[in-house]
Image (cartoon, rainbow, N blue to C red):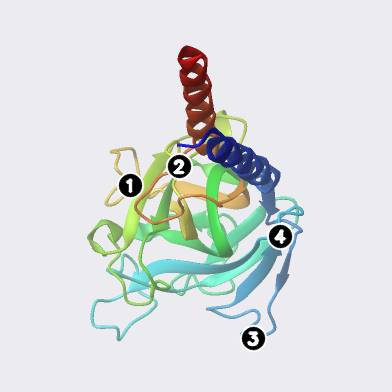
């Protein structure tokens, strides 16, 4: 390969590397004050909040869900349901998002107004980002009893349809377990997640559920409010089945080619 061509490739790779680093600053989406409830369905089941990330340019829409639906789809307010249905998302100043499901009703109080696993149901917050993101941390602002959570990501080609989906998301094509995380109250109220740097535009964060949570901890006793998530916008290798390698890899390959070409030229002399 011509040395000038290789050198240009290396320069281009370094430009890409620099751009990648510039667009990969850590962002935090705060759910205690950084969100606005959308007017549509405000204050009811199926409502949503629009949330911005600190100067990241990536916005999120948050909705609430719970497993209070029966398999036939005729009842949405049963205890220990087998399927997901809409719930009410409430934002509490200083502590973040809580969930009021259709079995608990809109008038439920503490601790059941949190994202909880009370009475054989599982509450969850679904985050839809307008760009693929790599989440790295989850924070809670309040807990009662226990504080275990489960994190899932969507790998499907189109947007997920959660209404009527089986409560055990491990059986639902397109959902992938990222991990379950225990005792957040004992770890500074935050958990580092997603060690493989998986990316998605859709993330589901729920009270711990041992049917799809990958662990065997105690259940039906987790009550948390979701305070924040942190991560970066995915700009490289963002396919649903792939991790995200360091953008430096391209630059390193090109620089290695330059070094090899320079060595070859010296030997020829």
Dot 4 lies on which element?
loop
Whole-number angstrom distance, CA of label 4 to CA of label 3: 24 Å
Question: Marks 2 and 3, Cα distance to the nearest angstrom?
Answer: 32 Å
Label 4: few (<14), some (14–19) or many (≥20) C-alpha neighbours in 10 Å: few
Q: Earlier in the sequence, mark 4 or mark 2?
A: 4
Task: Give the mark nearer the N terminus: 3 vs 1.
Answer: 3
Q: Nearer the viewer, mark 4 or mark 3?
A: 4
Residue wearing tag 4: 57
Around disc 3, counting alpha carbons within 10 Å, would you say few (fewer than 14), some (14 to 19), or many (20 or more)? few
- Residue 106 sits in quarter: bottom right
Q: Relative to 106, does residue 9 appear above or below in the rendering?
A: above
Spot occupied by residue 181 in the image (x, y as percentages of width and height): 44, 38
Q: Residue at x 62, y 31 (%)?
A: 188
Instruction: Describe the element under mark 2 as helix, strand or loop.
Output: loop
Mark 3 residue element: loop
CA neighbours of label 2 inside 10 A, class few (<14), some (14 to 19), many (20+) = many
Q: Is residue 3 above or below residue 214?
A: above
Quick one: label 4 or label 3, which is nearer the N terminus?
3
Say which label, 2 or 3, has the lower sequence index: 3
Q: Look at mark 1 in the image and give the residue it sits on.
A: 213
- At x 52%, y 14%, the residue is 266
Compare residues 206 and 118 and report the one nearer the observer.
Answer: 206
Determine whether label 4 and label 2 are within 8 Å by CB. no
Q: Specify the label residue 35 is tagged with.
A: none
- Seen at 38% across and 56% down, the residue is 240
269 lies left or right of 232: left
Along the line of sight, the residue nearer the viewer: 134 or 78: 134
Q: Between tags 4 and 2, which lies in front?
A: 4
| Residue highlighted by disc 2 | 148
Q: Which residue is mark 3?
A: 40
């Amino acid at each position: 390969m011509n040395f000038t061509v290789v050198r240009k490739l290396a320069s281009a790779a370094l430009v890409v590397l620099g751009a990648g680093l510039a667009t990969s600053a850590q962002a935090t989406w705060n759910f205690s004050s950084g969100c606005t409830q959308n007017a549509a369905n405000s204050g009811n089941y199926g409502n949503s909040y629009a949330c911005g990330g600190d100067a990241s340019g990536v916005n999120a829409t948050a909705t609430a869900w719970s497993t209070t639906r029966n398999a036939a789809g005729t009842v949405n307010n049963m205890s220990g349901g087998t399927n997901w249905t809409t719930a009410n998302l409430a934002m509490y100043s200083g502590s973040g998002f809580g969930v009021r499901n259709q079995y608990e009703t809109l008038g439920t109080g503490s601790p059941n107004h949190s994202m909880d696993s009370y009475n054989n149901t599982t509450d969850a917050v679904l985050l839809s980002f307008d760009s693929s993101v790599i989440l790295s941390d989850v924070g809670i602002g309040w807990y009662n009893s226990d504080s275990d959570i489960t994190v899932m990501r969507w790998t499907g080609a189109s947007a997920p349809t959660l209404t009527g989906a089986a409560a055990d998301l491990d059986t639902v094509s397109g959902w992938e377990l990222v991990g379950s995380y225990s005792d957040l109250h004992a770890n500074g109220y935050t958990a580092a997640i997603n060690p493989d740097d998986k990316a998605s535009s859709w993330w589901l964060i729920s009270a711990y559920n041992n049917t799809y949570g990958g662990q065997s901890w105690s259940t039906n006793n987790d009550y948390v409010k979701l305070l924040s998530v942190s991560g970066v916008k995915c700009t490289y290798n963002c396919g649903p089945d792939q991790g995200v390698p360091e953008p430096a890899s391209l630059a390193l390959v090109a620089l290695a080619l330059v070094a090899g070409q320079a060595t070859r030229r010296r030997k020829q002399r």
